[in-house]
Amino acid sequence: MEGDAGTRQLNPTDADETPESLAVSTAEKTEQATELQAPEPADEAVRDGRRPSRLGVGWVSVICAALLVSAAGAGVGGYFALRSHHDSEAIARAEAAALQAAKNCVAATQAPDTAAMLASQSKIIECSTGAFGVQAPLYSSLMAEAYQAANVQVQVSDMRAAVERHNADGSIDVLVALRTKVTNSQAADQEQGYRLRVQMAPADGTYKIADLKQVAS
């Protein structure tokens, strides 16, 4: 019996552990469990209702720069579109003015009779500029003589005009198509059709004839 008692003293069992040793062991296990269960910083952020950002500062800068470039591009595009619209309107106004002036001035070269010749001469000179302006007085004078010599009467049955092209100097070439009935001392109601190329140049706030040529039909 004494031998067994000595053996138990040299090899104590778990049942022989003191309350102090059990308390220390329990505290160590509690600390280890606490360390294993401690939440990561990201988990804490999620629990606080804040989602961690997936975009870095560099990506945010790139997106902002792209938005600025897009806005600038839209502004430039709008400016050029507006300017193009204004240019188109200016061209349309110029063409309309040149067409109307060409028709009025060409009509002056088709005086109805000798009685209207004086007014037509004045209109031809008023409608002329540039090289044709130099020739206009002689042109109108010769036309008046021809009317008087043959007792000419002219009736314009049709007149149409269209812009042919714009020139670098700002002038506009206009094609004018005419159909007339001419009566003179030798024949009556002769139908004639021809086309004129009229170069209309800006002058004195309007358009005037700078050149006048007959073209083949």
Image (cartoon, grey):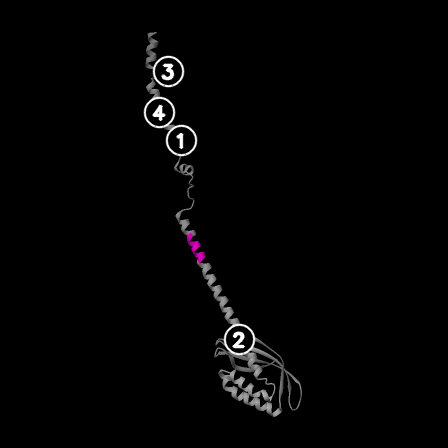
**Real-space CA distance between mark 4 and mark 2, rounded to the nearest whole angstrom:** 104 Å
- Residue 13 vs 74, above or below: the answer is above
Seen from this angle, which residue lies furthest right? Answer: 188
**Real-space CA distance between mark 3 and mark 4, rounded to the nearest whole angstrom:** 19 Å
- Say which residue label 1 marks: 37
- Residue 107 vs 88, above or below: the answer is below
Magenta highlight range: 64-71
First reached walking from the N terminus: tag 3 or tag 4: 3
- Say which residue label 4 marks: 27
- Place residue 40 in its image quadrant: top left
- Say which residue label 3 marks: 15
First reached walking from the N terminus: tag 1 or tag 4: 4
Q: Nearer the viewer, mark 2 or mark 3?
A: 2
Dot 3, crowdedness within 10 Å: few (<14), some or many (≥20)? few
Classify the position of the C terminus by image quarter: bottom right
At label 1, the amino acid type is: Gln
Callout 3 touching callout 4 (CB < 8 Å): no
At label 3, the amino acid type is: Ala
- Say which residue label 2 marks: 97
